[in-house]
Amino acid sequence: MNKVISSAEEAVSTIQDGSTLIVGGFGLCGIPENLIRGLCESGVRDLTVVSNNCGVDDWGLGLLLENRQIRKMIASYIGENKRFEQQFLRGEIEVELVPQGTLAERIRAGGAGIPAFYTATGVGTEVAKDKEHQLFNGRTYILEKAITGDFALVKAWKADSLGNLVYRKTARNFNPLAAAAGKVTIAEVEELVAPGCLDPDHIHTPGVFVQQVLAGGHFQKRIERLMTARV
């Protein structure tokens, strides 16, 4: 089954207003930048977006913020995005802040078919408000619900036409978790190879989780914050 599509516009054409998207990446590392630009051009609105953070003012998910296409953001970090901060403080966007490890586990649980789990993270803080508490071995835990999405947008290094994905180094981050938790997963990849060319032991996301593959495109590989040191 050939899952390769020809353009970002085609890839996002089935995403409708009000959809929930799980988007891979960490900062600007491993983000599906071409798919995000395709969403910007599509004009789809009222999105709920689940991602570690929301890019920067002029790149990544920050472009969707600029267009006011995001209604709710579920993230662990407001980050370097001033526009995100401003919209949050003005009440123009709904934000659910989730501890980073809990966010990763909620997405992983969604992909694994686990509806909820208990964690000690957040006990005694605002994170625990209105959540079920249980005592295990003398320690208090709170119940966190899994996250799934109508769509997952991920970025991979290599793929074959069957949708098997390989990520590169830290660009793996949230991408494998997101890929498994979307009802429809669209993968943006830098290099497309023929079936059988990928070592099965090196595949991070099996093709069964992926419905569409967008190959090629322009990749800027921006650095979110450049740090230099004088030697």
Image (spheres, rainbow, N blue to C red):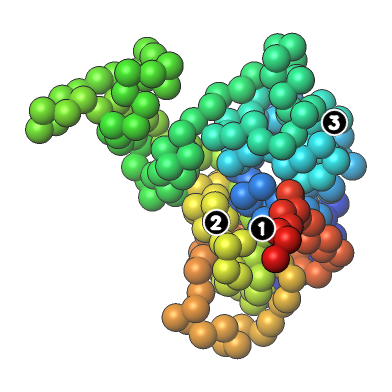
| Residue 131: image location, x then y, percent | 34, 18
Rendered view: 22 above or below 157: above
The residue pinned by badge 1 equals 30
Which is nearer the N-term, disc 3 or disc 2? 3
Q: Secondary structure at mark 1?
A: loop
Farthest residue to the right: give it: 41
Residue type for callout 1: Gly
**What residue does disc 3 label?**
66
**Picture coordinates of residue 92 (x, y %)?**
74, 15
Q: Is residue 101 visible?
A: yes
Relative to 131, 91 lies left or right: right
Determine the residue located farthest toward the left in the rendered image.
137
Q: Say above or below: 49 vs 206.
A: above
The amino acid type of the residue labelled 3 equals Glu
User: Alpha-carbon distance for marks 3 and 2?
Assistant: 25 Å
Tell me if label 3 and label 2 are in contact, CB under 8 Å.
no
Image quarter where the N terminus lies is bottom right
Q: Which residue is mark 2?
A: 173
Image quadrant of residue 96?
top right
Which residue is painted at 83% across and 60% down in the image? Answer: 220
- Asked if the residue at tag 1 contacts the one at tag 2, i.e. Cβ–Cβ closer than 8 Å, the answer is yes
Q: Secondary structure at mark 2?
A: loop
Say few, some or many: other residues with alpha carbon within 10 Å of mark 1 (under 14 / 14 to 19 / 20 or more).
many
Disc 2 or 1, which lies upstream in sequence?
A: 1
Q: Quadrant of residue 65?
A: top right
Secondary element at image label 3? helix
